[in-house]
Amino acid sequence: QVEIVESGGGSVQAGGSLRLSCAASTSVYEDNCIGWFRQYPGKEREGVAYIFTDGGTTWYITSVKRRFTISQDDAKNTVYLQMNDLRPEDTAMYYCASKGGVCPPPPGGLRYFTVWGQGTQVTVSS
């Protein structure tokens, strides 16, 4: 079964941390680009960070560089998004998705991601 399941969202105060997990079935994990996206109410979904699981190359949007870290655990077919120094503007629904092959530079390339999780809410209070 091809699937992606996110977990780890929650509510934190500004300056706090959360770690999101994205567990993927093998067919959409190996040698794929796994991306974390977020969506604000009434806005389009945007890419936040991507990782190409064959080699671990990563990409980030400017606003999360030095605060967020995307990483992989091949033994668990899982990609993580460690989010530090969270800000109220990071409040959004976060999604994980997979596309075959290399990653496009975020925040674009959404149309190439074909398998999506159900999302997990992150809320940061000031």
Image (cartoon, rainbow, N blue to C red):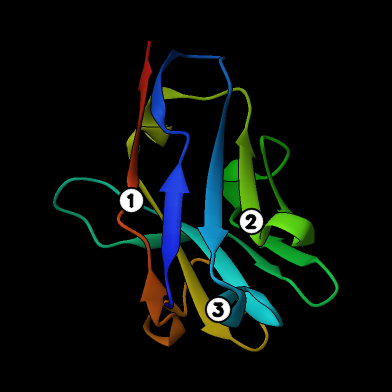
Task: Please count the marks in the image.
Answer: 3
* Crowdedness near tag 2: few (<14), some (14–19) or many (≥20) residues, C-alpha within 10 Å: many
Residue at screen point 40% across, 82% down = 114
Residue 3 placement: quadrant: bottom left
Q: Which residue is mark 1?
A: 119
Q: Which residue is mark 3?
A: 28
Indicate which label's residue lies in the foreground, 1 or 3.
3
Residue type at the position of mark 1:
Gly
Say whether disc 2 or disc 1 marks the residue closer to the N-terminus.
2
Q: Which residue is mark 2?
A: 78
Label 1, secondary structure: give it.
loop
Residue type at the position of mark 3:
Val
Say whether disc 1 or disc 3 marks the residue closer to the N-terminus.
3
Residue 83 placement: quadrant: top right
Q: Is residue 67 left or right of residue 118?
A: right
Q: Is residue 39 above or below residue 97?
A: above
Residue type at the position of mark 2:
Thr
Residue at screen point 43% across, 15% down = 12
Q: Position of residue 125 (x, y in %)?
A: 35, 14
